[in-house]
């Protein structure tokens, strides 16, 4: 799988992966750092992240476990270069992405906020 920067033309596929409107995904590409994983000429997943103070926040992570594992290397690499921690929230029962983050050494740091009624778990990877 090749990882590259997302471009506005990717918004439709990102919308398909998330079930969110295309315009929302287009704004995401403009407002965040977004990397897409491309396999067999198709986007297989993506990661978006922001850096603030001493932490890189993964705002979205989509794809199968192996795709997510590769995509997580992007914010982790950035964070390590800046001596920052990495945090992300996952739905409480999201085994696929949980496996990907735990395989990278993230540890649960407790409950996160509810999104649309779904409980979340906060994961953190120290710098």
Image (spheres, rainbow, N blue to C red):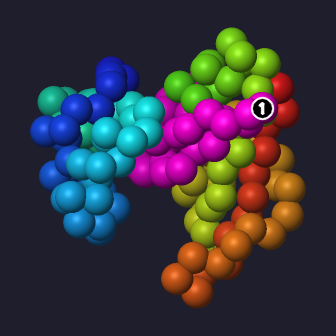
Image x and y of residue 3, in percent: 36, 23
Image x and y of residue 101, in percent: 66, 44
User: Quarter-wise, where is residue 89 in the image?
Assistant: bottom right
Q: Say left or right for 105 vs 67.
A: right
Asked whether residue 34 is in view, the answer is yes
What is the magenta range? 46-73
Image x and y of residue 18, in percent: 34, 62
For residue 108, above or below residue 48: below
Asked whether residue 37 is in view, the answer is no
Q: Residue furthest bottom?
A: 117
For residue 47, above or below residue 119: above
User: Quarter-wise, where is residue 96 in the image?
Assistant: bottom right
| Residue named by callout 1 | 54
For residue 15, above or below residue 53: below
Q: Say left or right for 75 vs 27.
A: right
Q: Say left or right for 126 vs 56.
A: right
User: Quarter-wise, where is residue 69 in the image?
Assistant: top right
């Amino acid at each position: 799988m090749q990882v590259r920067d997302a471009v506005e033309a990717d918004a439709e596929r990102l919308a398909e992966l998330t079930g969110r409107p295309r315009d929302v995904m287009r704004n995401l590409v403009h407002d965040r750092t977004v990397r897409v994983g491309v396999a067999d000429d198709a986007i297989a997943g993506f990661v978006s992240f922001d850096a603030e103070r001493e932490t890189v926040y993964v705002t979205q992570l989509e794809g199968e476990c192996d795709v997510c594992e590769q995509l997580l290397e992007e914010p982790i690499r950035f964070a390590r270069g800046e001596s920052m921690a990495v945090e992300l929230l996952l739905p409480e029962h999201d085994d696929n992405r949980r496996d990907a983050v735990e395989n990278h050494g993230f540890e649960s740091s407790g409950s996160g906020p509810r999104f649309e009624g779904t409980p979340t778990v906060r994961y953190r990877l120290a710098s």
